[in-house]
C-alpha cells in the first residue's frame, strides 16, 4: 500500500530554500523521482514559515522507500542537509477514501 511522507526541513535564514534549490539544480531530486516505487517528490514553501521547506514524498511501498534510503542519493542528501544545518520533522500518511460528507467541499 502506498503512503506519503511529509518532511519539514527547517534552518536559519533561507537555508531550507537554498537546500531545496540545490537538491533540484544538482539533479538529486530528479534521481530520487526516478527510483522504482517513487510516486511523488515535491518541495513546497509554507506561507507562514519562511525558514521551512516541506517535502511531500509518496512511495508505493515501504520496501521501495527502504531501497531509496540505501541509495547513493541519500548520502548526498544528508551531506546537503548538514551543509545547510537543517533539522527535520516527519509525518507519515496512508491514503483513504474521503467520507461523502467531506467530498461536497471539493470543487472539481
Image: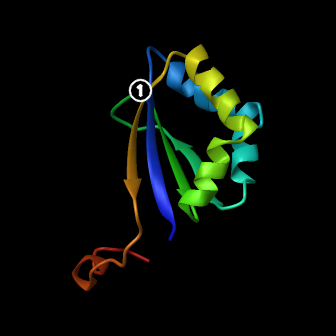
Looking at the image, residue 93 lies above or below residue 55: below
Q: Residue at x 60, y 15 (%)?
A: 83
Quick one: quadrant of the C terminus? bottom left
Indicate left or right for 106 with 85 as reference: left
Extreme-left residue of the structure: 101
Which residue occupies the foreground of this view, 39 or 62?
62
Q: State which quadrant residue 38 falls in.
A: bottom right
Indicate left or right for 53 with 83 as reference: left
Q: State which quadrant residue 39 falls in.
A: bottom right
Q: Would you name the residue on which mark 1 appears?
A: 50
| Residue 18 image offset from top left, x and y in percent | 60, 23
Q: How many marks?
A: 1
| Residue 101 image offset from top left, x and y in percent | 22, 81
Which residue occupies the foreground of this view, 82 or 26?
82
Q: Residue at x 72, y 59 (%)?
A: 36
Which residue occupies the foreground of this view, 74 or 26?
74
Q: Residue at x 64, y 30 (%)?
A: 77
| Residue 17 image offset from top left, x and y in percent | 55, 27
Q: Residues within 10 Å of mark 1 (few under 14, many from 20)?
A: some
Using the rendered image of the protein, determine whether residue 17 is visible from the camera's viewpoint. yes
Extreme-bottom residue of the structure: 100
Q: Residue at x 38, y 75 (%)?
A: 107
Disc 1 secondary structure class = loop
| Residue 98 image offset from top left, x and y in percent | 32, 77
Using the rendered image of the protein, determine whether residue 40 is visible from the camera's viewpoint. no
Amino acid at each position: 500500500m502506498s503512503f506519503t511522507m511529509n518532511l519539514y526541513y527547517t534552518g536559519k535564514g533561507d537555508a531550507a530554500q537554498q537546500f531545496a534549490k540545490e537538491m533540484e539544480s544538482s539533479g538529486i531530486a530528479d534521481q530520487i523521482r526516478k527510483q522504482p516505487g517513487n510516486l511523488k517528490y515535491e518541495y513546497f514553501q509554507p506561507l507562514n514559515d519562511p525558514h521551512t521547506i516541506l517535502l511531500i514524498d509518496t512511495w508505493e511501498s515501504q520496501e521501495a522507500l527502504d531501497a531509496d534510503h540505501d541509495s547513493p542519493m541519500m548520502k548526498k542528501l544528508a551531506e546537503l542537509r548538514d551543509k545547510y544545518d537543517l533539522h527535520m520533522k516527519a509525518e507519515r500518511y496512508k491514503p483513504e477514501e474521503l467520507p461523502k460528507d467531506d467530498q461536497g467541499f471539493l470543487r472539481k
